[in-house]
Image (spheres, helix red, strand yellow):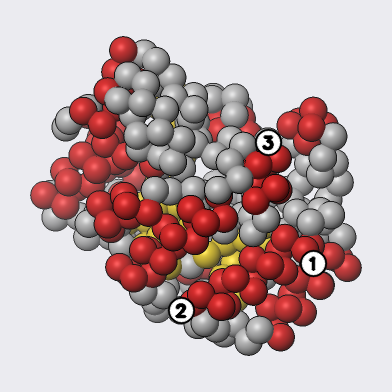
Amino acid sequence: MTFAPYKTCQLCPRDCKVDRTQGELGFCGESATCRVSFIGPHFGEEPSFTGTRGSGTIFFSGCSSQCFFCQNYQISLRHEGRTVTPQELLAETRALLQKKVHNLNFVTPDHFWPHIQSLCRSLREEGVRVPMLFNCSGYQKPERVAEYAEWMDIFLPDFKFSEPGLAQMCMGDEHYPETALRALHEMVRLKGFLEPWDVTGSETAQRGVLVRHLVLPGQVGNSLEVLRSLRREFGPGLPLSVMSQFCPVPGCEGKKEFQRRLTAVEYDQVLELVEELGFEKVYTQELQEDKAFLPDFKDPGNPFPGNKK
């Protein structure tokens, strides 16, 4: 594999230009040494990806977004995880595939893209044909999406913020809305909408795009504008996952923001607009105090209590 992209790193929109091969850390908080926090079947994704045998997730440490409210804060903000060589990553991924997972799901992958690209090349050369899934924040360089699409079959981006001010407050870049929208256009252009669409999970997705949006407490207006923007740009056929699972994490107390869970009234307002706008393919969630899939990466063997043993 080539480590060249790490030398003057411009893998994400932050354009740090640091030399990660010399141990310098980018905005993502990571060097050129690949670090992962969990590799295994995961049953907390949408049924289109988990099916009956789970999604084969590889969670990478660090993140280019650095949202203070991230539910994966232990790995995205606190950088918990272990180092793996390219050879170890390949061996562990082979072992994961032996568990007959429905896909390989790369979670927060862009800042370790050279490692992932090399891994995918090796797997394809070995004849592996399970779908590859790029599970991301939406904060991707639009011009890099075509390179991702050479190896990825499915894109699972967030669309977090419609309001520049909210994006600036949460992750330090007011340009998130326009950047994410441009990247999403590229993803849809290259892969289309998610297919097949089967909410039972009997027939798992093989290709395409599904957009996630997490509704934040006190920020219903942001969510409503996200929906209007997506409807305007992509029409009612764009597959969505509108999530209610927000749970306050330590960073919320530090910022004095989002220190409570979402209310039923707030979530219902968002779902009413989903229906009004005519979106045809939508995952929603029950609003409840279920923390089965709120991760604790201090248990790297099984950070998700809801996962099957």
Residue type at mark 3 is Phe
Q: Are marks 2 and 3 in contact (CB under 8 Å)?
A: no
The residue identified by callout 1 is 267
Q: Earlier in the sequence, mark 1 or mark 2?
A: 2
Q: Could you tell me how far apart the alpha carbons at marks 1 and 3 are, in whole angstroms? A: 21 Å
Query: Is there any visible trace of residue 84 in the rendered image?
Result: no
Apparent side of residue 245 relative to residue 211 in the rendered image (left or right): right
Label 2 CA crowd tier, 10 Å (few <14, some 14–19, many 20+): some
Label 1 CA crowd tier, 10 Å (few <14, some 14–19, many 20+): many
Q: Under tag 1, what secondary structure?
A: helix
Residue 292 picture location, percent across and down:
69, 49
Q: Which mark is residue 184?
A: none
Tell me the residue at 17%/46% (across/down): 121
The residue identified by callout 3 is 68
Tell me the residue at 72%/69% (across/down): 224
Q: Is residue 102 above or below residue 291?
A: below
Residue type at mark 1 is Tyr
Q: Quadrant of residue 278?
A: bottom right
Apparent side of residue 304 relative to residue 5 in the rendered image (left or right): right
Tell me the residue at 83%/50% (across/down): 261
Q: Could you tell me how far apart the alpha carbons at marks 2 and 3 are, in whole angstroms? A: 33 Å
Residue 90 picture location, percent across and down:
25, 36
Q: Quadrant of residue 95?
A: top left
Q: Which of the pair 273/48 is nearer the observer?
A: 273
Residue type at mark 2 is Trp
Q: Residue furthest top?
A: 22
The residue identified by callout 2 is 197
Q: Could you tell me how far apart the alpha carbons at marks 1 and 2 are, in whole angstroms? A: 24 Å
Q: Which of the pair 12/95 is nearer the observer?
A: 12
Query: Is there any visible trace of residue 29 in the rendered image?
Result: yes
Tell me the residue at 48%/30% (across/down): 28
Residue 302 picture location, percent across and down:
55, 38
